[in-house]
Image (spheres, grey):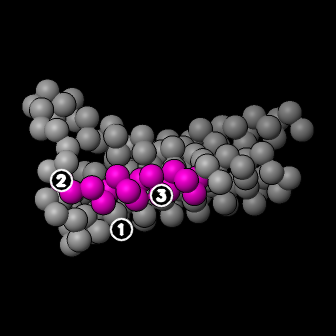
Amino acid sequence: MPGIAWFFLVLILICLPGNQFPKTSWLDSIFFDKWVHAGLFGILAFLFMLPYVHSSLANKEKLQIIIKTALAVSVWGLATEFIQKFFIPFRAFDLWDWAADSAGALLAYIVCNKKLKKTAKLA
């Protein structure tokens, strides 16, 4: 349920017109937008992966699910860029935003894979 709620929060945020965001040069200098993308999509992936990490499935199945989830979140990040390009006023496609989305999904995969390995050692 938290993953679904976060999915819709991300959807709402990516659908906001570009003129709704503050324009400050110091945020641009630290690539704040990319950090936000990585965080939003990393949390999205993590919230969908974590229940499987703690499930009773075999570790091989768990690993396959978290890999597929990371890939799905990355594809969703690409889709959101196209949504912004074609449907959202004052927004555009940004390949670096997608890279940040994918980096967030990758980070979630790394964290969940470590948790998976840790739980496998304890069993």
Q: Are marks 2 and 1 in contact (CB under 8 Å)?
A: no
Residue 43 at x, y percent in the picture: 51, 44
Residue 85, quarter of picture? bottom left
Q: Secondary structure at mark 3?
A: helix
Q: Amino acid at mark 3?
A: Phe
Q: Amino acid at mark 2?
A: Gly
Answer with mark 3 or mark 1, whichever residue precedes in sequence.
Answer: 3
Within 10 angstroms of label 2, few (less than 14), some, or many (20 or more) residues? some
Q: Amino acid at mark 1?
A: Ala
For the stretch drawn in magenta, what is the main secondary structure? helix
Q: Secondary structure at mark 1?
A: helix
* Location of the N terminus (image quadrant): bottom right
Answer with mark 3 or mark 2, whichever residue precedes in sequence.
Answer: 3
Q: Residue at x 16, y 63 (%)?
A: 89
Q: Residue at x 23, y 71 (%)?
A: 87
Residue in the foreground of this view, choosing between 47 and 16: 16
Answer with mark 2 or mark 1, whichever residue precedes in sequence.
Answer: 2
The numbered mark at residue 8 is: 3
Q: Residue at x 66, y 60 (%)?
A: 65
Q: Is residue 108 left or right of residue 35?
A: right
Q: Is residue 25 left or right of residue 97?
A: left
Task: Examine the structure image and report whether residue 16 is included in the region drawn in magenta.
Answer: yes
Task: Examine the structure image and report whether residue 33 is included in the region drawn in magenta.
Answer: no
Residue in the foreground of this view, choosing between 97 and 3: 3
* Residue of label 2: 18
* Residue of label 1: 79
Q: Which residues are magenta?
A: 3-18
Mark 3–mark 2 Cα distance, whole angstroms, equals: 18 Å
Residue 106 at x, y percent in the picture: 48, 47
Within 10 angstroms of label 1, few (less than 14), some, or many (20 or more) residues? some
Q: Residue at x 19, y 48 (%)?
A: 20
